Amino acid sequence: MYLHHWNMLADCVTWMLRHDPQLLSTQEWKDILEGLITMRGHSNSRTYKRGAKVVACLRPALIASNVSNIEGVLPVAPESCPELSLEQTHEMIWLVAKTGFRFEFCALDRRASGEERVDSVKQCFAGNMLIGVPLYLSQLGWAAPKVEDRHRYVHRTARLMLKWSTKTRRPDIIQRVNQTLQWSVAEMEALEQAVCRYYTQAFWEYFGRAAVVPLRLAHDVAPAAAKL
């Protein structure tokens, strides 16, 4: 049911992220995936206010899609949802996680650095994009199997972290990132571990919840046609 609702609403969410990016809470994402795009409960309740935010976020996208009313359309009954293959399921979960990770990264960098550095953040990802990530990137960038292939993205992230203001002390290896020209495999692994730990801790400090982390598709995908 969750995946079917995502399939129905993916274009709306993409439109929202492209035109008016919103950092939604875990529960707000859950409401979207459950098809609960309505205001429910008492007007002073958390449920009502959360529903109002979700509706406000998605309404412009629905209007742009010439959808005036979704009453009675969502949520879809579980028995009416089409079956998905295991690969389709993995691909949809990957897309949701990948999109969430990239936008959360962007939001955290904005908060922690106090600067608007979207273009620099994009360079930390394979494909240099935030939305519309194609499946062939699922084993590249942060999801590349080899640490040597991940290193360029880890290194770019570490350089952005030099301007982050956090209660947590920035790891020494990140502090030295601009001073090290040649990296051994062991040093690459140490930097990656430090960057991941610092990122997740910083995200918790600023947003009070666990961060979304990138995933890797296990099945084969088409090779990239363009140089990244």
Image (cartoon, rainbow, N blue to C red):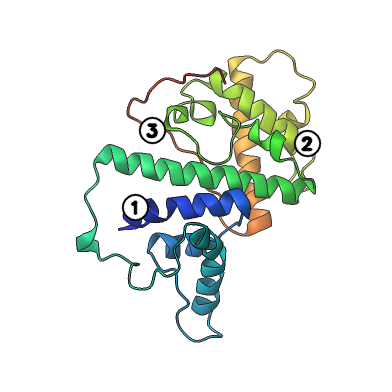
Instruction: Please tell me which residue is depicted at 78% across the width and 23% down the height of the picture.
Output: 178
Q: Which residue position is annotated with label 1?
A: 3
Q: Quick one: quadrant of the C terminus?
A: top right
Horizontal side of 81 relative to 11 (left or right) equals: left
Residue 70 visible in the picture: yes
**Mark 2 vs mark 3, CA separation in Å:** 31 Å
Considering only vertical position in the picture, is 118 above or below 159?
below
User: Quick check: 128 above or below 167?
Assistant: above
Quarter holding the N terminus is: bottom left
Amino acid type at circle 3 is: Leu
- Report the Cα–Cα distance between label 2 and label 1: 38 Å
Question: As shown in the figure, which amino acid type bears the numbered disc 2?
Answer: Leu
Residue 160 drawn at (x, y percent) = 74, 35
Residue 187 in picture, x, y percent from top left? 64, 20
Please give the name of the residue rendered at 60% of the width and 30% of the height, measured from the top-left corner.
192
Question: Is 132 drawn above or below residue 127 in the view shown?
Answer: below
What is the secondary structure assignment of the residue under circle 1? helix
Front residue (pair 110, 39): 39
Q: Nearer the viewer, residue 202 or 101?
A: 101
Which-is-in-front pick, marks 3 and 1?
Answer: 1
Residues at badges 2 and 3 in contact (C-beta under 8 Å)? no
| Disc 3 element | loop
Residue holding disc 3: 217
> On screen, 177 above or below 43?
above
Q: Amino acid at mark 1?
A: Leu
Image x and y of residue 133, in percent:
50, 36
In x, y percent, where is residue 105?
Answer: 63, 44
Residue corresponding to mark 2 = 162
* Labels 2 and 1 touching (C-beta < 8 A): no
Q: Earlier in the sequence, mark 2 or mark 1?
A: 1
Res. 210 in view: no
